Amino acid sequence: MRVFWEKGYAGASMTDLTAAMGIASPSLYAAFGSKEGLYREAIEHYVAVFSPSFWGVMDLPTARESVEGLLRNAACVFSDVGSPTGCMVMQTAMEEAALSPELAGSLCQMRASNADTLARRLQRGVEDGDVAPGTDIRAVADFYATVHKGLSLSARGGAGADELDSVVTSAMAAWAPLTSGALTT
């Protein structure tokens, strides 16, 4: 997982992967079938490890707390000096040409599901009364999903935790106007 996260799918050579795993190429092929098979397993592991901390915040009392929690958590994880920077799933958006159509489609769906999860939480906020009726749920979800993607990209580009946290603070300053129900697209 770390090799793919650090180097990307295309950048991770078989030599890099077998060295990290301490196995020979035939063992890798026997266990995973292909580089893509190994990558799929690595993505599944990444999602299993990080999804609870990212998406567990969707159960906070208000939609605002949930969205801010997601972004603050992302700022922390994406800039953690003990791990590769950014999001392993997001970084593949620029590698589509190196991926099979099936893998590219699967990763695209994973990235799109982030906005869907945010939209569901915002809708629950409307039902709970902490997001105004008439709020353009999809636009707000897409905005914060884009901020989330931007945090990943910025971390990959060298932004540290303080810079990412500042971006989150700025993005959350837009919460009240975005969720007041007064804006239309």
Image: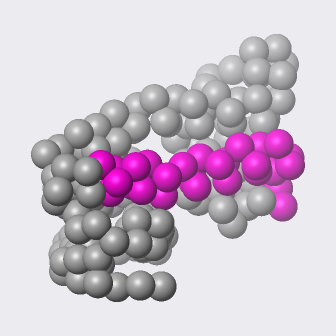
Residue sitting at x 27%, y 57%: 126
> Which range of residues does the magenta coloring cover?
97-124
Q: Position of residue 122 (x, y in %)?
A: 32, 57
With 85 as the anchor, is 62 left or right in this view?
left
Q: Is residue 77 visible?
A: no
Q: Outermost residue, left direction?
A: 61
Q: Nearer the viewer, residue 53 or 124?
A: 124
Q: Nearer the viewer, residue 86 or 83?
A: 86
Q: Outermost residue, front direction?
A: 133
With 115 as the anchor, is 71 left or right in this view?
left
Residue sitting at x 62%, y 23%: 22
Q: Position of residue 30 (x, y in %)?
A: 82, 14
Q: Nearer the viewer, residue 127 or 52?
A: 127
Q: Is residue 90 visible?
A: yes
Q: Position of residue 86 (x, y in %)?
A: 45, 59
Quadrant hosting residue 54: top left
Q: Is residue 33 above or below residue 35?
A: above
Q: Is residue 54 above or below residue 185?
A: above
Q: Nearer the viewer, residue 149 or 174?
A: 174
Residue sitting at x 39%, y 55%: 118
Residue sitting at x 52%, y 41%: 2
With 112 as the anchor, is 55 left or right in this view?
left
Quadrant hosting residue 102: top right
With 54 as the anchor, is 162 left or right in this view?
left
